[in-house]
Amino acid sequence: MLTPSTPDLTPSALPPVIGVVASQLLNPYQQKVLDEVTRQLNAHGVITVLLNAEADTALTALLRQASPLALRGLLLLPGNRVTDACDLPVLDIKAEPALQADALRAGEVTAELLIAQGHQTFGFMQSQPGESAQKQGYSTTLQAAGKALNVELTAEGDDRDGAYQVMMHYLKKTRAAERIQALFCESDLLAFGAMQAMRDFGQGAHLAVAGFGDSEEARSSTWHLTSWSSDISQILSNAINRWLGQPAEISRGQGQLQRRHSHFGKIRPGEMSACGCAFRH
């Protein structure tokens, strides 16, 4: 059972060791969170051990192999879960209220921007079916403006190939006049796959696209992706400090939507076409 209890960090001859459970390490957002988590834990004098496990059974085996390390706790990156057999204190980053609030706000602000561009039909791409704070904020804001979440696409995995396949399938089966005009993706990686599918499909398929994570690749002229940038450092600092029984700072930062070109969705004169990204998507 998951428990947010404080790990035992009583001073001893050796520094404490905490396992960081991660998967989907090719995802830029996961990489960003992993880098920040390990940096902050190391600053607390904690040694981190990476446990790359896609499933409960794999994690159970890893925990058994790691028993000589005497782990004091487990920290779960977003998209991961812990085996029910684990009796260590657990910090589940995805369940952090501040992270949930950030994702909710990302959906709200992204919807507001896409509506302001004059788009009338909207879609959301996710890595797996179900509800999320991002989709909730996005859908609620659309409804408040008299719009609707018209299409939900599921890539069956947080990777660009899955996004490419599901977007290509959608473009092929949907008549041009019936396609959505704007798409919000729950990660930059999904956005890249969707945009590449549009480019390869051609035939005038222009959709506005926005992502989440503000990865380094999103800023390149290849994509020029409009993407939500979370204040990961502050969110993780408060969560880790609280978990380790230390005072958390008052959060002054907040996420922001980094506006580039992809949310326009079609070629426009002037700055829009300066980097050449418009005609690619």
Image: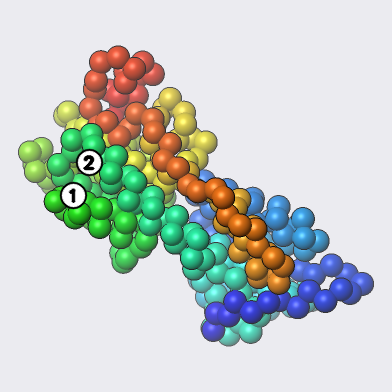
Q: Residue at x 41, y 40 (%)?
A: 257
Q: Are marks 1 and 2 in contact (CB under 8 Å)?
A: yes
Disc ID at residue 183: none
Q: Amino acid at mark 1?
A: Ala
Comparing 267 with 189, the one in front is 267
Screen quadrant of the N terminus: bottom right
Name the residue that disc number 2 marks.
115
Query: Is 139 rendered above or below residue 12?
Result: above
| 220 up-or-down from 209: above or below | above
Residues packed near mark 1 inside 10 Å, few (<14), some (14 to 19) or many (20 plus): few
Label 2: few (<14), some or many (≥20) within 10 Å? some
Q: Nearer the viewer, mark 1 or mark 2?
A: 1
Q: Position of residue 61 (x, y in %)?
A: 62, 76
Q: Residue at x 50, y 40 (%)?
A: 215
Q: Is residue 198 left or right of residue 179?
A: right
Question: Picture quarter containing residue 18?
Answer: bottom right
Dot 2 amino acid type: Ile
- Residue 205 shows up from this direction: yes
- Residue placed under numbered mark 1 in the picture: 145
Kindly state the secondary structure of the residue where label 2 is placed.
Answer: helix
Image location of residue 237, percent across then percent down = 64, 57
Query: In 3D space, how far apart are the residues under numbered discs 1 and 2 (Cα atoms)?
Result: 8 Å
Whole-percent x, y for residue 203 in the image: 16, 29
Horizontally, is 253 left or right of 158 in the view? right
Q: Nearer the viewer, residue 199 or 254?
A: 254
Asked whether, in this view, residue 270 is left or right of residue 180, the answer is right
Query: Mark 1 or mark 2: which comes first in sequence?
Result: 2
Quarter of the rendering occupied by the C terminus: top left
In the image, residue 130 sits, relative to residue 145, either above or below, namely: below
